[in-house]
Amino acid sequence: MMITGKMLIGQSAVLGDKGSLSAINPATHETLGPHFGVGGIADIEQACTMAQQACDRYRATTAEQRAQFLEAIATGILALGVTLIGRASLETGLPAARLIIERGRTVSQLRLFAQVVRDGHYLGATLDCALPTRIPARPDLRLHKIALGPVAVFGASNFPLAFSVAGGDSAAALAAGCPIVVKAHEAHLGTSELVGQVIQQAAAAHNLPEGVFSLLIGDGHPFGQSLVSHPAIKAVAFTGSRQGGLALMRTAAQRSEPIPVYAEMSCINPVFLLPHALSMRASEIGRGFVEALTMSAGQLCTNPGLVIALEGQPLTQFCNTALDALRKKAAATMLTPGIHHAYLAGIEEMGNINGVTTLGQGCSAEKPSAAQATMFVTDAATFLTTERLGDETFGPSSLIVACKNENEMLAIAEHLSGQLTATMQLDNADHSLARKLLPVLERKAGRILVNGYPNNVEVSHAMVHGGPFPASSDSRSSAVGASAIDRFLRPVCYQDLPAALMPEALQEGNPLELWRTVNGQCVLA
Ligand code: NAP
């Protein structure tokens, strides 16, 4: 496959004529060929209209057809081999080893959703049989979930594979039976086109309606706003900045038909070091912390940006060990010059806040867009009274809050805004404090971890990657794992529908062999 600089609209490759964009190697600031044509309103119109036209035919495909489509995309991504990994590495500055892991995760996501679709549990098939002799009589009621309709997907800069063109949002929407219109992230245009070509070919090979997938290239906010405003679009999936997510939420809410926006935005992923664990394992926890902080140059939505512990010798030991490890960490290239500038501005702002001290930094940056990891320290009173300290500085930066007592640790937990994750480093002797923290953290975060770090997000059935605002726009859903499909479904109830018209999932005799809820009981019948 070749990178052509064209958008993919249905089965066509279309060169945008509203200007051109180029990918940039963030490690050298060199421009990477080819030029990419920028699309306009007419391209959005065409992609969205085709998606709308594809909608009923695509959602009527069998589970097996959709599962095979998802599996074919996974196979196609693997078949791109070094072409994909090499291009993604050039465009993002992420090392090939990290991208190979990310590719594995992307492929696993697609395969997980193939399994979810085949299993059929996601349909939520529920039957309440008619009770004609009851007063009043109960009609025959049957519920299952159907696809919402075309979904606009905004690829994320920090996961060029796993949260981009064929990433988690796309896989979940396609699994649900929704056509997708993807806006390529400007930071990895070539990677986007390569993966887009795989989806386009898989759609053709599986004889799916043409508009099931389009990949658009736009320049500037108005393009994304127009995509979200298009009447054919019925939901939005986004990963990126809080400002971007909020802007798209406003646009979606102001449409004549408002639609849901599933935006995963910003948070600081607090890590609580409970006193006994810290006194027993300060150095080990400190070393692990620096590994987590510097992973992928800190450009992870699950980066541990806040550490909370009691002041004293164990915390000093944690800081010293962490600083030793930090000072050996090479500066790592960030995803884009823009993200790098925002990081530099962010750490400068943090360092200038009264009551905040810069504890130390990693090796100095010698290449363009390379970031020095940075640790700050403050006290609980400063944290509780300085709003900025609760906001994300995207990159390898973390703030340590030294508390005078457990009440201050609890006050900080209570003060936090919504988070994707909250972590406790604890031993058995810490259970009493953990019992007090847990109910607070449950209100604040989508995932609570013990004795680990939050960076890695397993793609599985029980995973939750979401949380109260501003971590995400809808705390009831997850952007990772099998339940991510629920975002793109809605329930429909059929009352007294004749058997001849009944959807297969709800038919007598259970032809799809689904676990269904029948008169309140979960049964395989
Ligand atoms: P971004 O600026 O939010 O952009 C993400 C996508 O949304 C892009 O396609 C962008 O396209 C579009 N977009 C942004 N603002 C928009 C608006 N007002 N209206 C319509 N579309 C909009 O994110 P980014 O480029 O990946 O990185 C910038 C900053 O986002 C980072 O410095 C970091 O702070 C944050 N970020 C956070 C995470 C996280 O996981 N927490 C991940 C990535 C980024 P256009 O720019 O072409 O409009």
Image (cartoon, rainbow, N blue to C red):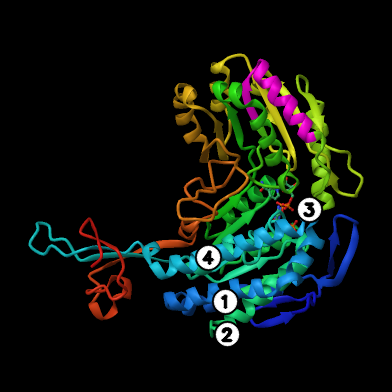
Task: Indicate the amino acid at tag 3.
Answer: Leu
Q: Closer to the N terminus: mark 4 or mark 1? A: 1
Cα separation, mark 3 vs mark 2, equals: 34 Å
The disc placed on residue 173 is 4
Marks 4/1: CA–CA distance: 16 Å
Q: CA distance from mark 2 to mark 4?
A: 19 Å
* Quarter of the figure with the N terminus: bottom right
Helix, strand or loop under label 2: helix
Q: Amino acid at mark 1?
A: Ala
The residue that mark 2 highlights is 205
The residue identified by callout 3 is: 335
Q: Which of the two labelled residues, at mark 1 and mark 2, occupies the earlier sequence position?
A: 1
Measured as percent of width and height from the top left, residue 7 is found at: 73, 75
**Amino acid beneath label 2:** Ala
Left or right: where 23 falls relative to 165:
right
* Front: mark 1 or 2: 1
Extent of the magenta region = 307-326
Q: Main secondary structure of the magenta part?
A: helix
**First in residue order: circle 3 vs circle 4:** 4
Residue mark closest to the camera, 3 vs 4: 3
Residue at the image position 55 percent from the left and 66 percent from the top: 110
Within 10 Å of disc 1 (Cα), the crowding (few <14, some 14-19, many 20+) is many
Residue 332 position within the rendered picture, expressed as x and y whole percent measured from the top left:
81, 47
Query: For residue 72, which numbered disc appears in the image?
Result: 1
Q: Quadrant of the C terminus?
A: bottom left
Q: Are marks 3 and 1 in contact (CB under 8 Å)?
A: no
